[in-house]
Every structure is written in structure tokens, then in C-alpha cells.
């Protein structure tokens, strides 16, 4: 996009799944949206980190690949023709005399809107790396922190470390695709969904994978690329495993970047919101998805969809002051007849 000055109704910072769905909900209310994202394509983590990972908790979809969910969301918002500023970071925010917000990116592009939605997921993120000596030597040579294409691991010897949903989900997904798979967790209890834990235990009981708990990877072996890992078990001591790939799936370290300097209420690196409408302490700025926090918060995509829906209802009054929203169901009107403002 060459345009240096962009005006819209809602400026959405973050083009992940929650930001994309906010476009749909805003569109139903006849509000225009423009999205800013530091990544080069929409989809956020789903596109950048695990496009081929199956997602199981999207209503109406027993299983859907992350990349397909993004594709469907983009198709869903096509009628509302959102704008995108991709590959640029939202750097500064200023309140204008007319009450609108001015957001400037790191490349100098200016965006103006009465409402801002911050839907930046975890913000700028990087993987949590285990404290293993010289692990950087094997990065891209057998050590991978993200799984972008499962086909890369077909018929390979894989060691996964971690006890959360990502480690469990990929263990389940790859169990029948790889030559050998070992899951290592430093505790006996897992942090992931109970159903996933049961599936992993079933795979181990049936000899499909090797499950080692109360242990952690402490060393890596190999010359030009990885050939094995060294595991320290709490009671059995050191165990050496041959491996073509080591996948430490310990999640991401979030970094809000410039957004952290915008005067927003914060708690443990996340933006605090009012659950009535997911507004922040700064009028006109809302935070939806993984980037916000409140009592009972669950970092699930479907929860972010709910937050986006309510935030759009509240944003309508700021975009259309003095007008009353007449809410109707899409099953009755379709998407063209929704959200007609009345004086």
C-alpha cells in the first residue's frame, strides 16, 4: 500500500484471527476497518508459527488447520473490504483535537480513526528457549521452535519437550507421521487439556510414542547438524537419545513493544480491560484477544471472538454519536441488512 494517510472507523492493530473477526462484526454494523500488522501477511501466529496445526475448539469445526481458519476468516470479511498495512509496526498514538486517534507506523504511515482495537495477540513474540549450552549452534539444523510444515518431520526421529497444549497437540498429530517420537516433560503432570493428556498417555501405552516424565533435555549432540539429545532424569540419571529433530515447545515470550508506552493499564505484560465491552482505561481504545487480561481470562480464539463482538457494539456509539443501533440477526437479514443506524 502506497497511501501514506489512511482514515477509517476502527483501526485494528493486529491482523490475527481475533482482529480479522472484528472486521466482520464491525462490518455488520456498517463500520469500516483498517488493520496494521508487523507481519507480512494476515493471520498472526496461525500463519507465522503453526499454519499446519489442527485446531479443535472452533465452534462448528471438529478440526481445522490454522491456515484454513485464516483463509475462511479472510473470505468472511471480503464483503466489507477492509484495508491492510502489513509489514509495519504501530509505533505512536496521539489524540487529535477532534477526539480521533492518530497512529503512526515505524515507516511513517499515518492512520486516523475515532476508535482503536488492539488485537495484537501476544504482541511481538519470540520462543522461550531452554537453557541448553550451545543450542544456537543447532537452530535450523535440527532444533526448531515452531512447526510450520509437518512434512519436514516425516519418517524422522523426533524429540519434543514441553507439557502444554502445543507439545501435546503436536505429539498427537505427529505420532503416526514420524519414524520415532519421544515426548519429554520435566513434571509428571501436564498443563494441557485433559483430553490431550489422555490421548498422549494412550499413545505411550500402545507403543506409538515414548513418554519420559520427570526429566529434561540438558545437552545436544552432533557435528554439522543434530544427531542426538541428552536427557537428565530425576531418578535414572542421564539418558542419551538419537534424534534428527529436537522441538522445545515451551511457548512464547510476549513483548508488547511500543504499545506498552501508550499509557494503557497493564498487568503482568497484558492490557487490563472492562469486561462490559473490553475497553481499556483510555476512552476509545479497546483490547481484544490474547493481549488483554481480566479475572477469569481464557486465552482461546473463541473467547477473543466474543470480546471482538462486544467491543464492536460499544465502538458503534463512538463512531456514530447520537445514533441508535438497531440490532438484528444475520439469520433474518443476511450480512447486507445488518446494523442500520437510526437517528
Image (tube, rainbow, N blue to C red):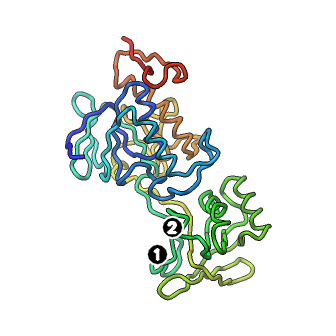
What label does residue 185 carry, if any? Answer: none
Task: Choose between 92 and 176: the one closer to the eye.
Answer: 176
The residue singled out by tag 2 in the image is: 145
Q: Residue 239 in the image: state x and y as whole percent.
A: 68, 83
Task: Choose between 269 and 153: the one closer to the eye.
Answer: 153
Q: Which class describes the residues within 10 Å of circle 1: few (<14), some (14-19), or many (20+)? A: some
Q: Gap in Å between the C-alphas at discs 1 and 2? A: 8 Å
Marks 1 and 2: CB-CB under 8 Å? yes
Task: Choose between 290 and 7: the one closer to the eye.
Answer: 7
258 w.r.t. 287: above or below: below
On the image, which quarter does residue 199 sit in? Answer: bottom right
Q: Which class describes the residues within 10 Å of circle 2: few (<14), some (14-19), or many (20+)? A: many
On the image, which quarter does residue 342 sit in? Answer: top left
Q: Do we see residue 54 in this rendering?
A: yes
Left-right relation of 241 to 150: right
21 w.r.t. 127: above or below: above
Q: Secondary structure at mark 1?
A: loop
Left-right relation of 219 to 253: right
Q: Residue 118 in the image: state x and y as whole percent.
A: 40, 42
Q: Secondary structure at mark 2?
A: loop
The residue singled out by tag 1 in the image is: 139
Furthest-bottom residue in view?
223
On the image, which quarter does residue 150 sit in? Answer: bottom right
Amino acid at each position: 500500500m502506497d497511501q501514506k494517510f489512511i482514515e477509517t472507523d476502527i483501526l485494528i492493530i493486529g491482523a490475527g484471527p481475533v482482529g480479522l473477526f472484528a472486521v466482520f462484526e464491525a462490518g455488520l454494523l456498517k463500520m469500516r476497518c483498517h488493520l496494521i500488522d508487523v507481519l507480512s501477511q494476515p493471520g498472526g501466529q496461525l500463519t507465522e508459527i503453526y499454519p499446519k496445526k489442527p485446531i479443535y475448539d472452533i465452534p462448528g469445526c471438529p478440526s481445522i488447520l490454522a491456515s484454513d481458519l485464516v483463509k475462511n476468516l479472510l473470505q468472511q470479511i471480503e464483503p466489507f473490504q477492509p484495508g491492510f498495512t502489513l509489514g509495519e509496526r504501530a509505533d505512536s498514538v496521539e489524540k487529535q483535537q477532534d477526539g480521533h486517534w492518530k497512529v503512526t507506523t515505524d515507516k511513517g504511515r499515518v492512520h486516523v480513526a475515532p476508535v482503536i482495537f488492539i488485537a495484537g495477540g501476544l504482541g511481538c513474540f519470540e520462543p522461550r528457549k531452554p537453557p541448553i549450552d550451545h543450542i544456537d549452534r543447532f537452530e535450523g539444523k535440527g532444533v526448531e521452535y515452531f512447526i510450520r510444515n509437518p512434512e519436514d518431520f516425516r519418517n524422522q526421529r523426533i524429540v519434543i519437550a514441553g507439557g502444554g497444549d502445543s507439545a501435546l497437540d503436536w505429539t498427537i498429530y505427529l505420532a503416526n507421521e514420524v519414524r520415532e517420537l519421544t515426548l519429554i516433560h520435566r513434571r509428571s503432570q501436564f498443563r494441557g487439556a485433559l483430553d490431550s493428556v489422555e490421548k498422549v498417555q494412550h499413545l505411550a501405552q500402545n507403543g506409538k510414542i515414548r513418554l519420559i516424565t520427570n526429566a529434561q533435555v540438558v545437552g545436544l549432540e552432533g557435528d554439522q547438524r543434530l544427531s542426538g539429545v541428552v536427557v537428565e532424569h530425576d531418578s535414572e540419571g542421564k539418558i542419551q537419545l538419537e534424534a534428527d529433530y529436537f522441538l522445545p515447545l515451551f511457548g512464547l515470550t510476549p513483548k508488547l513493544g511500543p504499545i506498552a508506552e501508550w499509557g494503557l493499564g497493564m498487568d503482568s505484560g497484558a492490557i487490563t480491560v472492562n469486561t462490559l465491552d473490553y475497553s481499556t482505561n483510555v476512552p476509545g481504545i479497546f483490547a481484544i484477544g490474547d493481549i488483554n487480561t481480566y479475572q477469569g481470562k481464557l486465552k482461546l480464539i473463541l473467547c477473543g471472538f466474543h470480546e471482538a463482538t462486544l467491543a464492536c457494539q460499544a465502538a458503534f456509539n463512538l463512531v456514530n454519536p447520537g445514533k441508535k443501533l438497531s440490532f438484528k440477526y444475520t439469520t433474518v437479514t443476511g450480512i447486507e441488512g445488518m446494523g442500520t443506524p437510526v437517528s
